Amino acid sequence: MKAQLKAILFDLDGVIVDTAKYHYLAWKKLADREGIYFDEKINERLKGVSRMASLEIILERSTRAYSEQEKLEMTEIKNNWYREMIEQLRPDEILPGVIDFLNSLKMNGIKCAICSASKSAAFIIDKLGITQYFDTIVGGQDITKSKPDPEVFLVAAERLNTLPAECVVFEDAYAGIEGAKRAGMKAVGLGDPNILTNADIVCKDMTEITLEKVMKLFQ
C-alpha cells in the first residue's frame, strides 16, 4: 500500500524567513573582532550547520588555537548579537507564498513542523506571529547531530506520530535535503536546481508550490 502525505516539515532559514543575513552579520562581527577573514562565500558553508560547527569553519583561517571554553563563549557572544538583531523581526519578513501554503495545509488537515538547527527557532516563529500553524518545532536544543544527519526530521516525525514515508521536507540547502533522504522522506528543494540535485522536485520559492504538486510525489 502506498504511503499518503500526513506531514510537511519545514526548514526555517531560507524557507519560512530569511534570517541568514542576520547570522552572517553576527558571525562577521565576531570574525572581525578576532581578526579572522570571513566573507559571504565562506558563509555559504555554514548553511544548515550547527552553531559550534559553524564556528569551527570560521576558525579554519585563524592564526591561533582556541580552547573549548573560549569557543563556547564565542558562540554565546555571536548568538547574543544575533538575538539582538532578530528582536526586530516582523511578520512582513515572512517569505512570499509561505502563508498561503500554510493555510492550504491547515484546511486539508496536513500536520506541520519546523525542523531547524537554530536554537532560536521557536523565538523566531513567535516573532513572525505564525506559531499556530505548527504542530511542533524542533530546534537545535532538541538534537545532537546536524543535517545531513536525519535526526531533526526523525524527531519531528515521532512527535507528529507519522511515519517517515508519510512526510515531505522543504529545504533550501543540499545538506538538508540529504538529511531528509536519509530519514526516508521525500524532499522539495527551494532554490537552484543545479545545486539541489538530490531533491524530488525543485521550485524557485514557495510561490511556485501547491499542495497538488506535493501530493503528486505520492502517486
Image (cartoon, grey):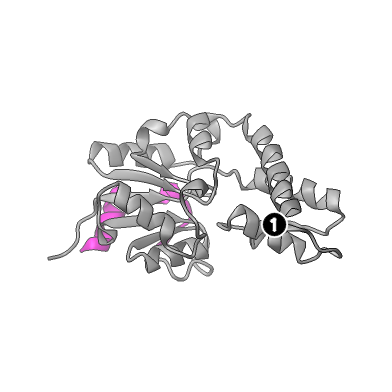
In the image, residue 21 sits, relative to residue 154, either above or below, namely above
Quadrant location of the C terminus in the rendered image: bottom left
Residue 12 lies, in percent from the top left, at 49, 47
On screen, residue 140 versus residue 35, left or right, reads: left
Instruction: Provide residue 109's location: percent of width, then percent of height.
Output: 23, 40
Residue holding disc 1: 55
Label 1: few (<14), some or many (≥20) within 10 Å? many
* In-image side of 139 versus 23 (left or right): left
Is 35 on the left or on the right of 6, as rendered? right
Residue 206 in sight: yes
Residue 56's spot in the image, x, y percent?
70, 62
Q: In the rendered structure, which segment of residues is drawn in magenta? A: 201-219
Q: Quadrant of residue 163?
A: bottom left
Of residues 60 and 206, the one drawn nearer to the viewer in this rendering: 60
Q: Is 203 covered by the magenta stretch?
A: yes
Amino acid type at mark 1: Leu
Asked if 217 appears above or below 14 in the picture, the reply is: below
Quadrant placement of the N terminus: bottom left
For label 1, the SS is helix
| Residue at horizontal 48 percent and vertical 55 percent from the top | 204
Q: Which of the two residues, 82 or 14, is positioned nearer the viewer here?
A: 82
Q: In the depicted view, which residue is nearer to us: 58 or 66? A: 66
